[in-house]
Amino acid sequence: AGAVEVAQGAQQEVDSLNDLHAATGLSVQTLSELAFANQLSGVAAGEAEGAYKKFARSIGEVHIAGSKTYKALAAIDPALAKQLRGTKDNNAAFELYMSKLASIDDVSKRTRLANILFGKSALFVNKIMRDGTGGYEALRKEAAKYGVVTDDMVDKADAYGDAQDRMNIAIAGLKRTVGIELMPALTEATEGIADFIAVNREDIGQGVAVLA
């Protein structure tokens, strides 16, 4: 039971990160490293998830020519806006954007830039970077020391989940088969009980009345 509980706990953690990956485009490993950094920085899980989802929506707008988001970003940092439009996926864009934010020591300037793609969720940026530009990257690297969820673990968790599903289906099938095989005997027994009650209803009623 202990081994199963450990495996199921790990699977749930990986599945949770994989669901967030599907919603944001950030890699499972990136999300795992960020979870560690967020925890040590006092960033709530819900706050961080909201920021990632807002970023995913915003980066999509950056790729739209003439969008308000792209214009706002280009007005502050045209080179960054161009670089972000050239990134291959959301994870690459996120890493580029966070790297740029981490390079800005001035909190007000960092916040102004963070607001463009993170919106109201930008507060988490200053929390996670409160120890300066090197603090954020240091936390990400430290996460690896204590163990993070890597992308290859997703396949193992999926395989385990599929195996569990097959086992549950097999058990359900076994219960169904056994139940059907028991039905004739239980039907006969049930009918016998019903007939007994019907024939002896008055006697049973009198017996109960005496006991009462």
Image (tube, rainbow, N blue to C red):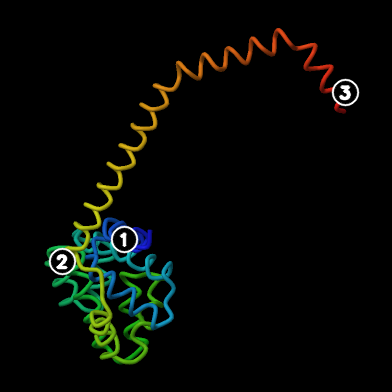
Q: CA distance from mark 1 to mark 3?
A: 59 Å
Mark 1 and mark 3 in contact? Answer it, CB < 8 Å. no
Identify the amino acid type marked 2: Arg
**Disc with the residue nearer the chain's start (1 vs 3):** 1
Identify the amino acid type marked 3: Val
> For mark 3, what is the residue?
210
Count residues near mark 2 (Cα–Cα under 10 Å), then give few for <14, some for 14-19, many for 20+.
some
Residue 112 sits in quarter: bottom left
| Residue at horizontal 30 percent and vertical 75 percent from the top | 34
7 displayed left or right of 123? left
**Disc with the residue nearer the chain's start (2 vs 1):** 1
Q: CA distance from mark 2 to mark 1?
A: 40 Å
Q: Nearer the viewer, mark 2 or mark 1?
A: 1
Q: In this view of the protein, which residue sits in the foreground, 141 or 212?
A: 212
> For mark 1, what is the residue?
7
Q: In this view of the protein, which residue sits in the foreground, 193 or 108?
A: 193
Q: Which quarter of the figure is the N terminus placed in?
A: bottom left
Q: Callout 1: helix, strand or loop? A: helix
Mark 2 and mark 1 in contact? Answer it, CB < 8 Å. no
Residue 12: horizontal and vertical position, in percent? 35, 59
Q: Which mark is residue 109?
A: none
